Image (spheres, rainbow, N blue to C red):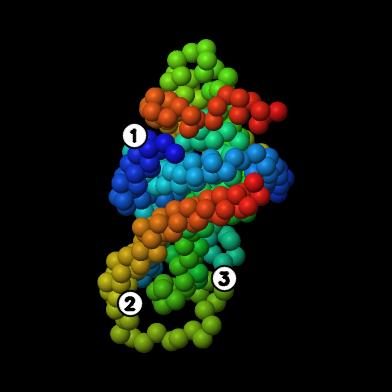
Amino acid sequence: MSPKLFFALALLLVMGTAPAQAHRLKVFATAEGAGVSGYAYFSGGGRAKGLGVVAAGPDNVPVFEGVTGEDGQFAFDAARRMDHIVTVDGADGHHGSFTIRAAELSASLPPGAEAVAAAVPVPAASPDLMDEAVARQVRPLREQIEAYQDEIRLRDVIGGLGYIIGLAGLAFGFSRRRG
Amino acid sequence: MAHIPDGILIAPVLVAGAAIAVAGCAFALKRIEPERIPQIGILSAVFFVAALVHFPVGPASLHLMLGGLIGIMLGWAAFPAILVALLLQAVLFGFGGVVVLGVNVMNMAVPAVLCGLAFHALRGRMDARLAAGGAGALAVLLTSVMVALSLALSGREFLPAAKLVVLSNLPLMLVEGFFTAAVMALVLRVRPDAVGGRTAMMEAAE
């Protein structure tokens, strides 16, 4: 066993304790009133800029097509109160998507391809403002939760290394029996 | 970008990849010498962790693939080493899919073995560090070409993606060539017997 291999491994481990970038393309979006905005990012870090965005209703008819901006962001206005599935396509086969539920959109929009069941009559005092305010406040929380879910934690790395060591040990053990 | 996610490739490519990966592993497992198992484990672990270490290069960021190094050090044992590491990366990190694992293993291990063989063939005739650097760079090139082919065969719409994969890996070829050369220079100086000897690799190839 070459000590230099240990050196290489130790070096990589040390460098790897910095937050790791992953290869998954993810999309996050929220609705405030009738406006939908969001961004595309790679789990663990950087934003995905210049990628194609498509938003479609439940019937797969596109209602918006665009390109993510410098910060991976995109925005559009929803015309109908239906589920919007936002998909971002990476150039090299990645794609990520996020669904905005009909209930997140403003109640004053006309119902969409799948009409919202039990259309609640909207009272005069606009609950829209409240919805928008709450959505704005909650958005950072939701971003944090999404990002948290994707983090690669040290325990994952150690688990993987442990598995490899264990498998090597098993392989060694079995080969000794045979030999 | 040798971690192709699930749901992109078509069935024939998936089946071919799985078959080649299994065949390579079977071939390797029959020939593994027990004394080399710890080394195989260590290199598999290095490969596993390497995907987490990113170097920013221009707008994108790259990570070392280490296919060349693994091929030189392990020969055919690169197959099981890479299989285990890729499987764990898929399950624990979500890098690459599980259904597409066979293809990803093939795309990484076949160039690794080929470059390992090339290194051992050329080692006697030129500066070993140069041979190692060339093998490291070539492995990156072959891997990205194979990834591009896998994508291109799965649909015309993937042709731009395929070209992008090859182009974006060109800087990595340089980095990895140097890295492989440096590591091999160290290994050859300190523990030359750690490298699969020419006879061992040639025998395995027969």
Callout 1–callout 3 Cβ contact below 8 Å: no
Q: CA distance from mark 2 to mark 3?
A: 23 Å
Residue B58: numbered disc: 1
- Give the amino acid at mark 3: Ala
Q: CA distance from mark 1 to mark 3?
A: 44 Å
Chain holding disc 1: B
Element at label 1: loop
Query: Is residue A145 shown above or below B203?
Result: below
**Number of marks:** 3
Whether residue B124 is visible to the viewer of this picture, yes or no, is yes
Element at label 3: loop
Q: Residues within 10 Å of mark 1 (few under 14, many from 20)?
A: few
Residue B134 x, y percent position in the rendering:
48, 22
Residue B1 x, y percent position in the rendering:
49, 41
Specify which label sits upstream in the sequence, 2 or 3: 3
Residue A131: numbered disc: 2
Which picture quadrant has residue B21?
Answer: top right
- Give the amino acid at mark 2: Asp
Residue labelled with disc 3 = A113
- Give the amino acid at mark 1: Gly
Q: Nearer the viewer, mark 2 or mark 3?
A: 2
Query: Is residue B63 shown above or below B130?
Result: below
Q: Residues within 10 Å of mark 2 (few under 14, many from 20)?
A: some
Residue in front for this viewpoint, A43 or B29: B29
Kindly identify the residue that appears in the image at 63 percent across and 52 percent down: A177
Chain holding disc 3: A
Residue in front for this viewpoint, B56 or A161: A161
Q: CA distance from mark 2 to mark 1?
A: 42 Å
Whether residue A39 is visible to the viewer of this picture, yes or no, is no
Q: Nearer the viewer, mark 2 or mark 1?
A: 1
Q: Is residue B111 left or right of residue A88?
A: right
Chain holding disc 2: A
